[in-house]
Image (cartoon, helix red, strand yellow):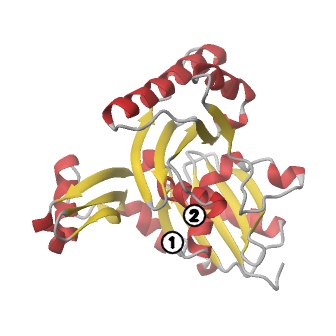
């Protein structure tokens, strides 16, 4: 492994690190794993570093070309914003002003980034606004004792999933992706370089109910959001839906969701890609569905997305 460039992607969970190691020469995912931290790793950088360092030593990994981090949409602010033509020359200022309208945070409390989705200077632009708390970004930049572990980039899982779909399969038509984690469900409608719609589904139904009943309620809520996306965002009826995340690894949840989807809508597990090789070893492939965000953020650096 020492003769090839390795890229490590990390998705920060509530009490875990979801990691994916990629080989750029073979465009292959070598390893995936979910590392338990017991505390929130983005709030506890010491534990983040200790757990990550232990996993790297266990797997005899050194000389990583780049480490990148992605955080869940629930840990950030993600909005589609239309910027009128007169504000385009001062796009950064406009987005800071917009962020101030939707938060009560002090000025400078968030690091703001954006991705231009469509439009031009004459008609205005639609951008994907992304804001993450400055304290988390600063912790990742400055909190590691080992400088070799300092992440070179940070993004939100929405972008990571777009990277994975584009690089892994090559997006041609509109695609729908569901990232079903126990902290919340994120739903994306996307085509190449463009996020058409973004919706979130609460997982409060999982509290104080049986697993079967909770999954039934959650599957219904997801289908309701798909219906609203068709009505409010003019999204077409999808013939297939891709799914990843923690609950995508639970056959019972997948079964419940499949049963709720329309008869002509296929639910596809994101455990294979036409343009990206995945691990074949059972241990290394076990967490692929759970580590989709980690794979995507590694790809964004590796492919220069």
Please identify the quarter of the rendering in which residue 240 is found: top right
Q: Residue at x 10, y 67 (%)?
A: 86
Looking at the image, residue 69 lies above or below residue 209: below
Q: Is residue 240 left or right of residue 51?
A: left
Percent position of residue 148, x then y: 63, 79
Q: Nearer the viewer, residue 241 or 184?
A: 241
Q: Is residue 95 left or right of residue 289?
A: left
Which residue matches tag 1? 153
Which residue reaches farthest left?
A: 86
Residue 191 placed where, x, y %? 48, 54
Vertical arrangement, residue 270 with respect to residue 153, above or below: above
Q: Earlier in the sequence, mark 1 or mark 2?
A: 1
Residue behind mark 2: 297
Residue depth check, mark 1 versus mark 2: number of the one nearer the observer? 2
Rendered position, 262 above or below 240: above
**In the rendered view, does 282 fall on the left or right side of 61?**
right
Residue at (67%, 80%) from the top-left corner?
65
Nearest the eye: 55 or 253: 253
């Amino acid at each position: 492994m020492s003769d090839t460039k390795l890229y490590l992607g990390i998705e920060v969970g509530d009490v875990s690190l979801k990691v994916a190691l990629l080989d750029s020469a073979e465009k292959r995912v070598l390893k995936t794993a979910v590392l338990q931290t017991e505390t929130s790793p983005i709030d506890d950088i010491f534990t983040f570093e200790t757990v990550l360092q232990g996993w790297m030593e266990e797997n005899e990994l050194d000389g990583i070309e780049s480490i990148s981090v992605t955080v869940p949409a629930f840990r950030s602010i993600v909005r589609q914003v239309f910027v009128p033509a007169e504000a385009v020359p001062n796009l950064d200022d406009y987005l800071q002003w917009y962020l101030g309208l939707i938060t009560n945070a002090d000025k400078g409390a968030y690091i703001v980034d954006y991705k231009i989705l469509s439009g031009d200077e004459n008609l205005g632009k639609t951008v994907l606004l992304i804001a993450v708390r400055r304290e988390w970004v600063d912790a990742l930049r400055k909190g590691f004792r080992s400088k070799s572990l300092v992440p070179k980039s940070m993004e939100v899982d929405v972008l990571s999933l777009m990277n994975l779909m584009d690089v892994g399969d090559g997006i041609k038509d509109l695609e729908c992706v569901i990232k079903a984690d126990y902290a919340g469900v994120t739903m994306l409608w996307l085509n190449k370089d463009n996020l058409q719609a973004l919706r979130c589904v609460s997982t409060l139904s999982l509290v104080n109910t049986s697993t079967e009943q909770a999954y039934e309620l959650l599957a219904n809520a997801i289908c309701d959001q798909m219906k609203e996306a068709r009505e409010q965002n003019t999204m077409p009826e999808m013939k297939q839906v891709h799914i990843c995340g923690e609950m995508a690894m639970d056959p019972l949840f997948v079964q419940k969701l499949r049963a709720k989807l329309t008869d002509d809508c296929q639910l596809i597990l994101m455990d294979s890609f036409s343009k990206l090789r995945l691990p074949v070893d059972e241990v290394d492939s076990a967490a692929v569905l759970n580590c989709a965000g980690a794979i995507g953020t590694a790809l964004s650096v590796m492919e220069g997305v």
